[in-house]
Amino acid sequence: MLEVLVVGGGPAGMMAAGQCDPRRARVTLMEKNEKLGKKLLITGKGRCNFSNDAPLEQFIANMPGNGPFLFSALNAFSSRDLQDFFRLRGVAVKRERGGRLFPESDRSSDILTALEGFLKEKGVALRFRQRAQKILLEEGRAAGVLTEAGKVYRADRVILAVGGASYPGTGSTGDGYSLAGEAGHTILSPRPGLVPLRVAEGWVRDLQGLALKNAELSFKAPGGAVEGEFGELLFTHFGLSGPIVLSLSRRMLGQREGLTLQLNLKPALAEETLLKRVQRDLDKNSRKQYQNCLEGLLPKKLIPVVVSLSGIDPDKQAAHINREERLALTRLLQNLPLTFRGFRPLAEAIVTVGGVSVKEVNPKTMESKKVPGLYLCGEVLDVDGYTGGYNLQTAFSTGYVAGKRAAEA
Ligand SMILES: Cc1cc2nc3c(=O)[nH]c(=O)nc-3n(C[C@H](O)[C@H](O)[C@H](O)COP(=O)(O)OP(=O)(O)OC[C@H]3O[C@@H](n4cnc5c(N)ncnc54)[C@H](O)[C@@H]3O)c2cc1C
């Protein structure tokens, strides 16, 4: 019998532990928290967007952090396989916009319960409040783990599934980088991915709490290409958050402060159409002051901001606003400039960009090319995706492969 030790009880570690063939391996899962899947529970705002049903090529294209490394793992355990896995364990699955997959119940706890049941069914031994501090090596092979409390866990195979370094309160405190680094792995510097943005403009803070459902945020990359995201955006006390901001932040990785972002409040309308719409609203309210004419166009909170930025006298009677001013207002609505002041810290990121170099991991087995007997899976690896279920599917697929292969003789 092989002894397999899985370090980390997140989605990658749970899947890996359960996939080890119990006829070949005795499996122990060690977790430093007092329970499994703390981060999993808060995913998708507690609804757990556990996968995305995009076809393989498209899936990979949505993994800006080393997507091609995942071809084998996603082939071995696809989104369809993961859906079947959960259905088989009593979790009904639903599909939402953009191929996002959720438990029908909208409860991440159903996903966790299914995984816990899987571990029980496979006889995995769980050890809580055990924090791995060092991977033990013997003749260059992984031979177990030393915990922070000084306890030694011996094993023939070690699967490292300790996650990244974002949301440290969930247990993902970046331990994997020192554990794998000391064992001889190259670590690409961890940076925030899918993270809120700080912007300079004071008026943004005044709008704190306001969500826009159909906005477009874009920036002009130094190469000249405009990159943008369309959907929901949230104003916060420091700047911008919400789904499109998180996704755009990944595209902005490496961009410097001072860059101008463009916010389009009316992205669905061509300029000419919006101009007519503005004119119609002003005509309808021709006797009112300009500042009281925009309620049909904008959420209440945004009106004073747009009025002030437009430079048109707020008290001016609507009927007296000329074509030039209408055009300027239309352009402002579709091109509100914002100054990028940097990213929020890694602790607030949805994923960690960087981690263990995938060049040193066999993509077919998830075994380390540096340390035989050591397997790595999930976010500890230098892989990351956009929002939409790509990151959890990656954790499950790489965990699946690591578990299956680690337990082979
Ligand atoms: C707020 C939020 C929402 C998200 N929503 C989504 C979503 O809807 N869809 C999606 O696809 N992705 C989402 N993600 C990303 C996704 O949660 C992660 O990519 C995924 O959890 C990574 O899985 P993992 O198993 O590799 O690591 P983790 O889930 O981070 O699990 C690692 C585990 O290892 C344990 N551990 C760490 N160090 C040690 C140690 N030294 N010894 C023992 N145990 C240790 C930790 O306590 C933790 O339990 C979200 C992330 C956040 C923060």
Image (cartoon, rainbow, N blue to C red):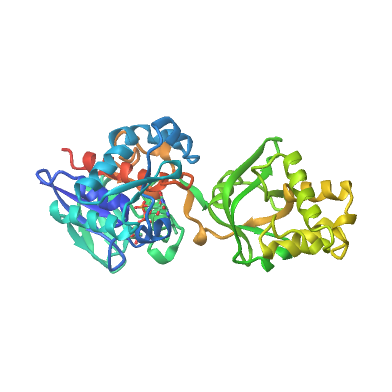
Q: Nearer the viewer, residue 361 or 403?
A: 403
Is residue 201 shown left or right of residue 146? right
Instruction: Locate the C terminus by quadrant.
Output: top left
Report if residue 338 is visible in the image.
yes
* Image: 365 above or below 129: above
Residue 59: percent from left, percent from top? 43, 36
Q: Residue furthest top?
A: 57
Q: Quadrant of ligand 1?
A: bottom left
Residue 135: percent from left, percent from top? 30, 54
Q: How many marks?
A: 0
Residue 70: percent from left, percent from top? 38, 36
Is residue 204 shown left or right of residue 129? right
Residue at 74 percent of width and 47 percent of height: 277
Residue 257: percent from left, percent from top? 70, 53
Residue at 68 percent of width and 35 percent of height: 225
Report if residue 382 is visible in the image.
no
Residue at 24 percent of width and 42 percent of height: 84
Residue 173: quarter of image: bottom left
Is residue 63 shown left or right of residue 227? left
Q: Nearer the viewer, residue 307 or 52?
A: 307
